[in-house]
Amino acid sequence: MADFGSTIRTLERTSTFTGTPDYLPPEVIYGKKYHKSVDWWSLGVTLYEMVATQTPFEVGDDSELYARMVSSSHLKFPRTFSSQFSDLLKNLLKVSFFLNNIQLTDFDYP
């Protein structure tokens, strides 16, 4: 379930961009430095997709996708998800603290 050809091995923080848009954490979208904790975000997206058969922020264009990903208000769960599973996903798909002060109107992904 991983494409190790596009992985980055580092012990330090990095700010490189690699991955499929639906799985990118907000830190990567905004070009912030990050470390291996962003993998928890990708795990949350993967778990959601495995159960719901679609990603949690699925939408037609990448700009709208990224805007939804940085706004936790767009995270919705199907009724078929148990409350425990929804809680797990809420914790895995948390937007980092430093991103909470960014205005969505400032969002402009190239």
Image: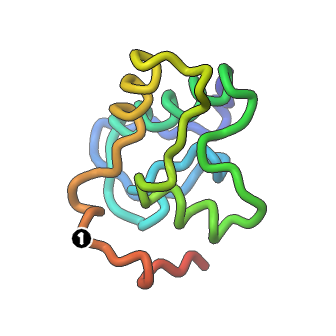
Q: Which residue is mark 1?
A: 101
Residue shown at the point (61%, 49%) measured from the top left = 57
Given residues 5 and 24, the one toward you in this image is: 24
Give the left or right position of residue 100, taking residue 62 as reference: left
Place of residue 9 in the rendered image (x, y in percent of width and height, measured from the top left): 44, 35
**Residue 45 to residue 34: above or below:** above
Amino acid type, mark 1: Asn
Give the left or right position of residue 65, taking residue 99 as reference: right
Query: Which quarter of the picture shows residue 80?
Result: top right
Q: Quadrant of the N terminus?
A: top right
Residue shown at the point (63%, 71%) measured from the top left = 63
Query: Which quarter of the picture shows residue 55?
Result: top right
Which color mode does the image show? rainbow
Place of residue 88 in the rendered image (x, y in percent of width and height, measured from the top left): 39, 23
**Residue 109 to residue 32: above or below:** below
Residue shown at the point (78%, 61%) measured from the top left = 60
Q: Secondary structure at mark 1?
A: loop
Residue at the farthest front position: 79
Residue shown at the point (50%, 28%) measured from the top left = 43
Give the left or right position of residue 50, taking residue 45 as reference: right
Place of residue 14 in the rendered image (x, y in percent of width and height, measured from the top left): 36, 52
Give the left or right position of residue 77, taking residue 3 as reference: left
**Residue 74 to residue 56: above or below:** below
Q: Quadrant of the C terminus?
A: bottom right
Place of residue 34 in the rendered image (x, y in percent of width and height, measured from the top left): 33, 50
